[in-house]
Image: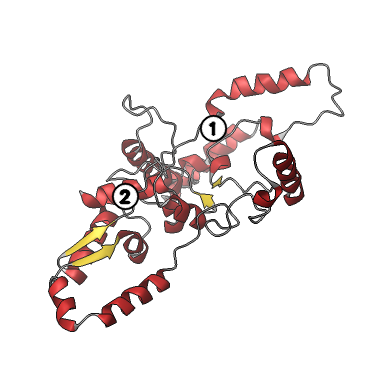
Amino acid sequence: MSSPVCSEYNIALQDFNHHAFTTSEQHKDSTEARMTRDHSDLRKLKERVQTYNPFSADDESFRNIVTGVEATQNVNVDDLFVVGQRMVDKLVGQLAFTWSFKRKDKAKTLGDASAVKISTEESIDPALLFQRLIVISRAGDLSLGDVLEFELSPFPPSLFEASGVFRKPDKAQLARAIEELANKQSETAITSDIPKTESYVLDGGSLIHRVPWDKGTTYDTIANCYADFALRNYDTATVVFDGYQETPSTKDSTHERRQHRQHPLVSVTPGAVFRGTKDEFLSRGSNKQALINMIKQ
């Protein structure tokens, strides 16, 4: 009851002394720092939406508007109600205290697919393989001598590694053969067969890993760095890339040997900002190909 009376005395004393008593904003969302941060976040969100527009009618892929990572077919977070209903249906008729939800049944998000594991090798029992070959030798056209003529292995070890991919070529042996052939030829024969040229041929795969990337730069800036590097160091050069298409190629065995985990597919656009690490981005062949296409332009 005395609060209104005291407030009148308080106001009168402030007017008499020409002083005013004020308090700061009591709600944290009304502070200047919070409003500045909200404006900054709103500006960043606007830039992300303009770069990776999730409402574009031309591209209906499900992607992260910050990193540009595109979702795989396993991502079903947009159907979370269907996934939840499916989990509830499995719970019907079960004891509540003994039932446990499986991780594989929950909705898959983009965070769950941060890396894709390459399929592992299937092991084959040599004893089982030997038994099957014995059966074939007795029931088929092959004799036991023909069956045991080769090493018991699910693949030819002379051509394939243990992981099932082709063995690496012996480039040193090829270089020695070329050197021996050149030594047998005269200097005049070599110079007459090899035309003089002032052009360089660069390995595109090595060039991609040679130029460093700076975080916060756009993909078109990164592509221009490669062009500037080639012109600055080699003037006139021809860059040869392997090509990283989804179709099979002669370099598939080499790519499979180098890769253990794949980074998700990233939507590479000129104005998009590169985020993440360079090694993760280049672990996916489609990401490499998109960058190569931008460098060629």
Q: Is residue 50 left or right of residue 168?
A: left
At 86% from the left edge and 23% from the top edge, which residue is drawn?
95
Mark 1 closeness class: few <14, some 14–19, many ≥20 residues within 10 Å: some
Q: x, y (%) of residue 40?
A: 38, 45
Give, as a three-letter code, the residue at label 1: Val
Q: For the residue carrying disc 2, how many other residues have a C-alpha within 10 Å: few (<14), some (14-19), or many (20+)? A: many
Please state the horizontal and vertical placement of residue 163, each as a whole percent of the image.
59, 54
Give the answer, above or below, for where 246 lies relative to 150: above
Q: Amino acid at mark 2?
A: Leu
Marks 1 and 2, Cα distance to the nearest angstrom? 25 Å
Residue 213 visible in the snapshot: no
- Residue at label 1? 75
Instruction: Left or right? Give the position of 76 relative to 288.
Output: right
Tell which tag, 1 or 2, sits nearer the viewer: 2
| SS category of the residue bearing label 2 | helix
Left or right of 143 on screen, residue 39: left
Nearest to N terminus: mark 1 or mark 2:
1
Regarding residue 123, the answer to whether it shows in the image is yes
Q: Residue at x 57, y 54 (%)?
A: 156
Q: Could you tell me which residue is drawn at 27 percent across and 47 percent down? A: 293
> Percent x, y for residue 166?
50, 55
Callout 1 touching callout 2 (CB < 8 Å) = no
Residue underneath mark 2: 291
Checking the image for residue 190, the label placed there is none
Name the quarter where the N terminus is drawn: top right
Q: Secondary structure at mark 1?
A: loop
